[in-house]
Image (spheres, coloured by chain):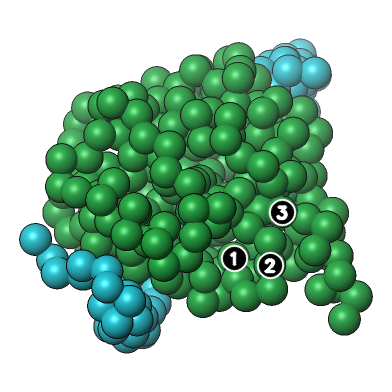
Chain colours: A cyan, B green
Amino acid sequence: MKHIVKIFSLVVAITALWIGLLQSSVIPRSHTWLLPVYFVVSLGCYGLLMVGVGLMNFPTCPQEALLLQKDIVEAKEYLKQRGVDVSSS
Amino acid sequence: MDAQNKNQANKYSIIVPTYNERLNIGLIVYLIFKHLKDVDFEVIVVDDGSPDGTQDMVIQLQKVYGEDRILLRPRPKKLGLGTAYIHGMKHASGNFVVIMDADLSHHPKYLPKFISKQMETRADIVTGTRYVKGGGVHGWNLIRKLTSRGANVLAQTFLWPGVSDLTGSFRLYRKSVLEDIINCCVSKGYVFQMEMIVRASRKGYHIGEVPITFVDRVFGSSKLGGSEIVEYLKGLAYLLVTM
């Protein structure tokens, strides 16, 4: 099944649930009408939270830059010894 | 050792597209050979007519390592990444293909991990991920990290890709699988990398992940402007609707 169909089915299911709530008056009408707004806003907040958390925990690797420098020196030495021109232009 | 015998049956074609990477291609070839002892592989350099002497460097490397291990398959000018992979694959004699960047942001020391991950899990694709524990990025400022994280959250929310790093381009593919997906892909740039992995996921291919570290030395040149963001959103929308 195409992905967009899955998402569409999910939206339809949630909409059906919402209409059901509207008709059955389990929750006061005024709140029910606003449910989609609450939903979208919470989704947005969740997204921002995920971005923030991800940003705080962004994996970094400063030691890798140093290791890379060592590798570069080693590589240049090896290649130079074998007649390869390793001068940086 | 049993794993080593299995290694003999598999051959890995490492495709490295280059443009003005004269020194880097030498360094990366050295590192590949250093980390892949006892592995049957070849390096295929697809150079897009670099004016800085990249191809001369490759010829010098061929003298050191052998023309059967380093293949130079150039093109006359910059023709795009997707076609570079296709071009490289035409000359690949391995049953597995690795794609990686030439600028040393992808370190060859992860190649053995890619290979063993594939053998352990029998995966069709093994993709390097920068965003999990054990992986990481160096050389990105806060804004770059923010856009990367924002883009990833958007893609995860809407595409459910099953992969943690969608735009990464350090990957090992079973050659038949790469041939299958690459001919369907139409996007360019990093959306192309996303399209490849999402297509593979939708087709039911088994995708494994290996944490990798990514050292970005090309400071400041990849400025993320408004047009880049628009291109990304358009690409995301395209993938959302067509997959």
Secondary structure state at the residue bearing disc 2: loop
Q: Mark 1 lies on which chain?
A: B
Q: Is residue B211 left or right of residue B142?
A: right
User: In the drawing, what numbered circle is on residue B39?
Assistant: 2
Residue that label 3 marks: B11
> Is residue A44 among the parts visible in the rendering?
no
Secondary structure state at the residue bearing disc 3: loop
The residue at 49%/60% (across/down) is: B66
In terms of depth relative to the viewer, which is nearer, B215 or B136? B215
- In percent of width and height, residue B238 lies at 50, 18
Query: Which of the two discs, 2 and 3, labels the residue nearer the N terminus?
Result: 3
Distance from the alpha carbon under mark 2 to that under mark 3:
8 Å
Count of numbered marks: 3
User: In the drawing, what numbered circle is on residue B111?
Assistant: 1
Q: Which amino acid does label 1 sit on?
A: Leu
In terms of depth relative to the viewer, which is nearer, A25 or B58? B58
